[in-house]
Image (tube, rainbow, N blue to C red):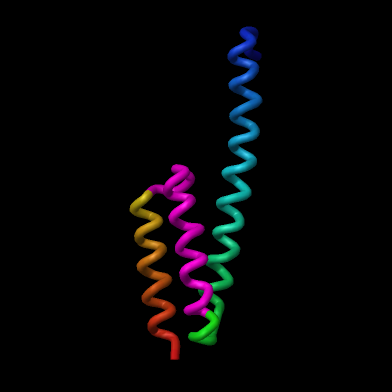
Amino acid sequence: MANHKSALKRIRQNVAKRLRNKYYHKTARTALKALRNEEDKTVASEQLPKVIALVDKLAKRNIIHKNKASNLKSKLTKHVNKLA
């Protein structure tokens, strides 16, 4: 276990950040799942900008890679456009 005060503080900070990142990631995954399961195009079109904003925030905070965020946004947009 760490002995220095700064190391103990760093451990506390890492725990807090990990919990916060886990919350953001799980929230976004739930929103992605809801959008993928949506059958109605109008509802999906309304949800898409909100989900894209969540994904962008994850990439900005380095929770997911920027290329993964781009791929997710592209696939979701294609999915919404394909709905009848």
Is residue 25 shown in magenta? no
Q: Nearer the viewer, residue 67 or 55?
A: 55
Taking the spot 62% from the left edge, 23% from the top edge, the residue there is 11
Q: Residue furthest bottom?
A: 84
Taking the spot 53% from the left edge, 73% from the top edge, the residue there is 47
Q: Is residue 58 left or right of residue 74?
A: right
- Position of the N terminus, as image quadrant, is top right
Question: In x, y percent, where is residue 16?
Answer: 64, 34
Taking the spot 51% from the left edge, 79% from the top edge, the residue there is 44
Question: In x, y percent, where is residue 4?
Answer: 62, 8
Is residue 53 shown in magenta? yes
Q: Residue furthest top?
A: 3
Q: Quadrant of residue 19?
A: top right
Q: Is residue 53 left or right of residue 66?
A: right
Vertical placement of residue 17 versus 54, above or below: above
Taking the spot 63% from the left edge, 19% from the top edge, the residue there is 9
Q: Main secondary structure of the magenta part?
A: helix
Q: How many marks?
A: 0
Vertical placement of residue 10 versus 70, above or below: above
- Position of the C terminus, as image quadrant, is bottom left
Question: In x, y percent, where is residue 32?
Answer: 53, 66
Vertical placement of residue 57 versus 20, above or below: below
The magenta segment is 44-65
Question: In x, y percent, where is residue 61?
Answer: 47, 43
